[in-house]
Image (cartoon, rainbow, N blue to C red):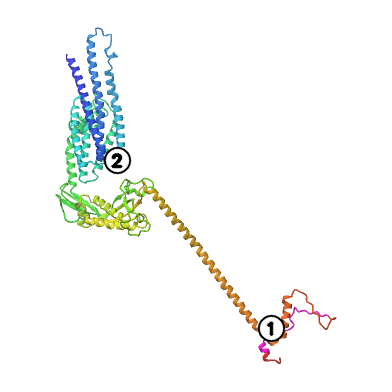
Amino acid sequence: MANGDDFNRAAESARLLTKLSIFAGIGSLILLVTTLAVSGSRGSTTLQIAAIPYVFSLLFSAAALIYGILRTSVAHEDEEKKLLEKRMESRALNVEEDVRFTAGRSFANYRRFAPYAIAAIAALLMGFLLWQFTQATDPKKVLATAEKITASPIHTALLSAVMMMVSVLAGAFFAGQSRVREFRWLRPAGAWLITGFAGMLLVTVSSICTANNINGVDKICSRILFWLFVVLGAEFIVNFVIEFYRPRTIAETRPVFESQLLSFFTEPGGVMRNIAAALDYQFGFKVSGTWLYGFIERSFFPVLILWAVLFWGFTTIHEIGPDQVGIRETFGKIEQRLLTPGVYWTLPYPFGTVQRFSCTELKSLYIGESTTNADKRSATPVVLWTNEHGGADDPFVVAVKTEGSDKNLTDSDASISFVRMGIPIEYRIKPSFEDVYNYAYGNASPVKILRKIGEQAAAEYMAGATMDELLSYGRRQAEQTLAKRIQALADQNKLGIEIVRVGIMDAHPPVEKVAPAYQEVIGALEEKETEILKANAYAATVIPEANASAMEIVEAARSYSNRISTVAQAESERFKFQLSAYQALPGMFKLNNKLDVLTQETAAIRKYIVGAGLKDEIYEMNFETRERIDLVDIDSAELSSNPAQ
């Protein structure tokens, strides 16, 4: 009868394990579905990655369920074997080899091979989930999701707090049940439910910080969970590999897929006891029984407390760098002076601290069209207006100057357009105590207020500007005007900020409809400017050539005029001399001219002189030599004054 009770207890224990596995799986599924359902509408990246522990608690609950079902079958099979042995009169048939009894072999194979398969599946699943998380947290997708967020961070905090309590209670229950040897396979599910409690705790903290305008906490919490899951995923791989080489004891109780890192904090018992159990399991002998481990166990917590006290004492020392100023706080009271560079002492944190600020470091923020990694814009390739780029921010409204309108637009000029642009604002903290105090304590988030101020100043200025100005000649003036307006608003709100520079970058019409048409207009204007430049270049070439040709013609005319007038004057003087000679000796002058005609005009013609009274006599005379003085060479005035000669 005792054996029958043993079989009943084993079967009842296996059935209870099956029920607990079902409850763990249903609870994990509810928590997982709830987390996934609300993560898309809450805008929290920490909430998205906090769903991963519930995926693994569901996986390990399914593994424990299969283990419980197989173990229940084995318990019933063992009972049937025992009854069959009592009824058999002959031992000729081996009951262990009966084909009807296969549950034992299936259970043995499951215990032998399933942990390795589950460890491999868990490693691949962790990698896939982390990759999906990195894709879901892409900046463009985050911006697109942020537009759909309607829930308050306070609601997210309340929801995550409820899920946190459910996770820790369920995880503690299943981890406590796993102390019983028969329920050992429930421990991984309980450990991951407690991990879900840690994830929901970070979600609660980040949501409360977001509700109080403390930015950046959600990103930090999500990164903490991300790298925690990276380590746990790597542990699956490491456990899968080293399990082939680890020394084994007779009784193996830890599945290969169970995380030893999580067991330090989730298993019942102290942390040192869990570390000792993990070392004993890993090395195959009782490491916790050695002297070295005993010494470490006795001195670990005292040394840890001593180091914690020393580190806490170091929080009393504060150093202010060469380009920094500081404000000292003691029990929340602010010392009314700026601390110059040096080393200062305060009470330990959180009773005393020093806030450090740099008044020389240029800080920047970017408003307008959103871009990925604005600090790396220099490496961004050239993008045309007509190509989709930038973020989904609303464009600025600008005026369009109509044909015939003057520069000062009135209410009758109803033409408007939209323009997208990025406006980087560079600023720094003013170095006076009042300004540093206003920056640090006067506003909850001076950077956020500065962003709103910049958006307000940009919207007001763009409403009175034209697109042509912003895209061309008026950009520099717009930057200077925006800088003055933002500085005035910052001083009005007592931000303690000095605006160093405001820029306008990537100004272009909206890509959807306006950009293609505007690109054609800009192309036509560019072609117009090109033709004007070509005409100017042609004029610059032709006009100098024409001027040079005109100058050449004028100078040639002047030369010709000078030559003609000089020759005419010479001819006139020559004519005067001829007239004087003619008046003095008319007959000789005529004879001389006739002779000149004969010698010059008919030089190449043979001439014959025939005398009127000498018909039969012929004389040959050579006129090539000059035999007498030419009458032209005689000074007529001298000849007339001396007629005797």
- What secondary structure is the magenta-colored segment mainly? loop
- For residue 630: magenta? yes
Q: From the image, tell me which residue sits under label 1.
A: 632
In this picture, residue 3 sits left or right of residue 515: left
Local SS, label 1 = helix
In the image, residue 242 lies at what x, y percent? 30, 30
At 59% from the left edge and 77% from the top edge, which residue is drawn? 565
Q: Earlier in the sequence, mark 1 or mark 2?
A: 2
> Front-most of 632 and 529?
529
Which one is in front, 98 or 294?
98
The part of the image, by quadrant, that contains residue 623 is: bottom right
Which residues fall within the magenta stretch? 618-639
Q: Position of residue 56 (x, y in %)?
A: 26, 31
Residue in the foreground of this view, choosing between 379 and 323:
379
Q: Is residue 221 magenta?
A: no
Residue denoted by label 2? 137
In the drawing, does residue 433 fall left or right of residue 639? left
Name which residue lies at 25% across and 7% down: 90
Which quadrant is the N terminus positioned in? top left
In front here: 305 or 339?
Answer: 339
Residue reaching furthest to the right: 616
Q: Residue furthest front?
A: 412
